[in-house]
Amino acid sequence: MQISQAVLSARDWNETSLAGLQALAPDWVLVFADVDAFDGHLHTRLRSVFPSAVLCGCSTAGEISLRGVSDGSIVVTAVKTGAGAVTAVRTRLQGMEDSEPAGTRIGKLLGAEPFAAVLLFAPGVDVNGSALIRGVRNALSPEVPVCGGLAGDRGTFTRTFVLSNEAEGDREVVAVGLSRAVFEVGHGSFGGWQPFGPMRRVTRAEGNVLYELDGESALAIYKRYLGTYADELPGSGLLFPFSMVNSERAQVGLIRTILGVHEGEGALILAGDVDEHGFMQMMHARTDALVEGAAAAAEAASRADASDRTCLSILVSCVGRKLVMGDRVDEEVEAVGDVLGAAGTLCGFYSNGEISPFLDTTECKLHNQTMTIATLYARP
């Protein structure tokens, strides 16, 4: 496996800047870019440089590369593996209610092949990420892990974009199946957030919309906790996500970020499903704990038996982590690089939601506020 990477300005780049990657004659090109890059011509311009490569990627709330974290850029990572290594499919998401059907369509397009893994990129607004993943999982072989994320837009939760092999758009959903004959895949996902305050019972919720906690408007309760931050919703909600707790008051290892608010209904719109019989508890974080969580994700995703092999690591980290860490955000990417070693190439983005299995399983879930990593090694 050969890998080459370029980091360009989203507003001022030209095709000649990709000459080095073009010379590689890649089979597959991943693109993670600021929303400014998605001007309706991005796909056409990339296709002119890479006429036969599989294209995929999405808009971001920050781009990740070997250089670290950047804003307002395009990170283009070209991969040469040989014919048949990747299979790309796409569909269009018609709205939040289409989330699970869209996932099912994607899964059926991929078919029953036992891929080493599937990478999934989807819009980061007007979507139920949990339902989308459920649709994909129900249509795939159960042993196939699914990794990826929901596109970002600088934390504004207004309009995100996905790049597929055929198009770019705010309703595109793309999945890439990785051949088991070519790739070995590792994965890891960790947070670093800590719960605080009381556990509150979910008394009304539908899908990913949380209406009531303890019989009171979820939005009203949340605003009381946020204080002056309430005026900056939904963006300020990234700083205070919810931990999901089951009906027996046990943490289940899932975090939910606020994607939007419904003032008229007094409701919070979350990135994924809510357990209608469970509890919710607010969370906060400090930078050192988030960096430690990123390193733990890298440890889980790494393969000790492949440390000398070329590795492509796809990092998907939540935009909320970026806001908390501020100027120290590069530290979590550096921590990942320290674990994975010099043989690896890092690419990825800050997202509105992360997609990964739990540790040691292929049961894929939507995560929020985590660093999620997929490591792709070429088989020897």
Image: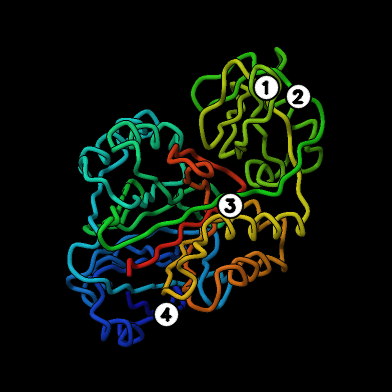
- Crowd rating for badge 3 (residues with CA inside 10 Å; few <14, some 14–19, many 20+): many
Using the image, determine if residue 31 lies above or below residue 114.
below
Please name the colour scheme applied to the rendered image: rainbow
- Horizontal and vertical percent position of residue 182: 27, 63
Report which residue position mark 4 lands on: 6
Q: Amino acid at mark 1?
A: Phe
Question: Real-space Cα distance between discs 4 and 3?
Answer: 23 Å
Compared to 164, does 264 lie above or below?
above
Q: Quadrant of residue 8?
A: bottom left
Assign a secondary structure to mark 3: strand
CB contact under 8 Å: marks 2 and 1: yes
Asked which secondary structure carries label 1, the reply is: strand
Task: For mark 2, give the secondary structure.
Answer: loop
The kind of secondary structure element at disc 4 is strand
Residue at numbered disc 3: 318
User: As rendered, which of 162 and 265 lies closer to the eye?
Assistant: 162
Q: Which circle's residue, 3 or 2, is located before the other in the chain?
A: 2
Distance of label 3 from label 2 (alpha carbons): 23 Å
Q: Earlier in the sequence, mark 4 or mark 2?
A: 4
Q: Position of residue 126 (x, y in %)?
A: 44, 38
Marks 4/3 in contact by CB < 8 Å: the verdict is no
Looking at the image, which is closer to me, 121 or 98? 121
**Quadrant showing the N terminus:** bottom left
Q: Is residue 337 visible?
A: yes
Choose the circle earlier in sequence order: 4 or 1: 4
Residue position for label 2? 199
CA neighbours of label 4 inside 10 A, class few (<14), some (14 to 19), many (20+): some
Dividing the image into 4 quarters, which one contains the C terminus?
bottom left
